Every structure is written in C-alpha cells, then in structure tokens.
C-alpha cells in the first residue's frame, strides 16, 4: 500500500529544496478536495433521494451553505486543476489564494513540474478514510516537513486546514 510519506518523497525528488513546501501545499489541496468530493457525493445523494431532479441538484451542488467543510470553488477542485494544461501555475496560485485569503506565497515552478506533482498525488486517495487514518497522514506530513526542514510558515494552506482535516 502506498503511504503519504512515499508520495511526498517522490515529490521531493522533483523539487528544489527551497520549494518543498509546495509538496505539502499540494498534498493538503488534494486531501481537502478528496474530503470535499466525498461530502459532495453525500449531499447529491441526499437531494436525489428526496426526489429533486438532477438538473436542479446540479445547481444546488454549487451552493456553499450546504457544505459542513470548506466549500471548494470549481477552479480550485482537483479534477479541474489536473486537467488544466496551459496556465497551471496561475490556476494553482489562484486556487491557493482563494482557499486561504492571506495566501501570499508565490511559487516559481514550471507547469511541467506542477503537472508531475499532481500526477504523483493523484495516485493517492484520501477519500473514505477513517479519522484515525487522516490524523496519521497529517502527522506523517508534519514529520516529513521537519525531516526536510520545510519552513512551516511557507505551508499556509496546510497550517490553515490541518486541524480541520483530522
């Protein structure tokens, strides 16, 4: 079974030391998205069971007030980002900024590198895991940051959501 620490190691091999916090940020974004999609599916099924037509359900699914966790706008969702080709760096920056209003970190990475990081992280599915497993994943991320001397101040998204993700 693939563990989060192995995924992070693969990301580390692709990044320069000064950019390692990006791996944590992208892992956090993936984790948030997986949990969001799981909640989204539950909400969708609830609406359909109530007899609401699919077309109306599709519209309701974009209403942030139905979600208990952080609502993720379409342009910040994992599937949107992994299919983006031309402006990937800008799309990632906008997604991170929209999810964390105080996000001021700018990443100097090529689209190719970002796409490879996304492909690596896409191999790992957070969805449906017990909270004890998520806590272990968060702890592994913290340990990896410490071992690789990642400045936690650069991991703004992780800092903002690590407690929420447990």
Image (tube, grey):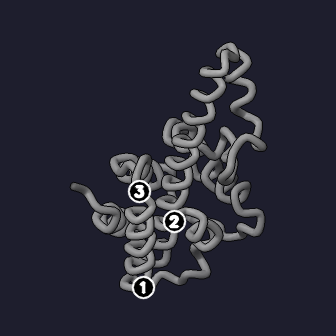
The residue where tag 3 is placed is 130
* Label 2 vs label 1, nearer the camera: 2
Q: Are marks 3 and 2 in contact (CB under 8 Å)?
A: no
Question: Circle 2 sits in a helix, a strand or a loop, which is it?
Answer: loop
Label number found at residue 166:
2
Q: Quadrant of residue 103?
A: bottom right
Foreground of the two, 141 or 93 = 141
Within 10 Å of disc 3 (Cα), the crowding (few <14, some 14-19, many 20+) is: few
Residue 146 image label = 1
Q: Is residue 20 left or right of residue 11?
A: right
Disc tally is 3
First of labels 3, 1 by sequence position: 3
Q: How many neighbours does mark 2 have within 10 angstroms: few (below 14), some (14-19), or many (20 or more)?
A: some
Camera sees residue 14: no
Residue drawn at (75%, 42%), measured in percent from left and top? Answer: 64
The quarter of the picture where residue 2 lies is bottom left
Residue appearing at x 36%, y 84% in the figure: 147
Position of 86 with respect to 17 (left or right) is right
Work out which residue is located at the far front of the displayed protein and give it: 50
Instruction: Give neighbour class at mark 1: few <14, some 14-19, many 20+ (Cα, 10 Å).
Output: few
- Which residue is located at x 47 percent, y 54 percent? 114
Residue 61 percent location from the top left of the image: 69, 31
Residue farthest left in this picture: 1
Q: Quick one: label 3 or label 2, which is nearer the N terminus? A: 3
């Amino acid at each position: 079974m693939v563990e989060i620490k192995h995924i992070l190691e693969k990301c580390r091999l692709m990044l320069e030391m000064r950019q390692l916090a990006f791996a944590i940020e992208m892992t956090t974004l993936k984790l948030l998205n997986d949990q969001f999609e799981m909640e989204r599916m539950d909400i969708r099924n609830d609406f359909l069971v109530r007899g609401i037509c699919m077309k109306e359900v599709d519209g309701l699914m974009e209403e942030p007030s139905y979600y208990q966790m952080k609502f993720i706008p379409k342009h910040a969702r994992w599937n949107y980002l992994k299919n983006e080709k031309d402006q990937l760096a800008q799309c990632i920056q906008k997604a991170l900024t929209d999810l964390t209003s105080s996000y001021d970190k700018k990443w100097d990475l090529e689209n190719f590198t970002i796409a490879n990081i996304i492909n690596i992280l896409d191999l790992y599915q957070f969805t449906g895991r017990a909270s004890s497993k998520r806590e272990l994943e968060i702890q592994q991320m913290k340990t990896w940051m410490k071992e690789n001397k990642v400045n936690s101040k650069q991991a703004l998204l992780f800092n903002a959501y690590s407690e929420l993700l447990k």
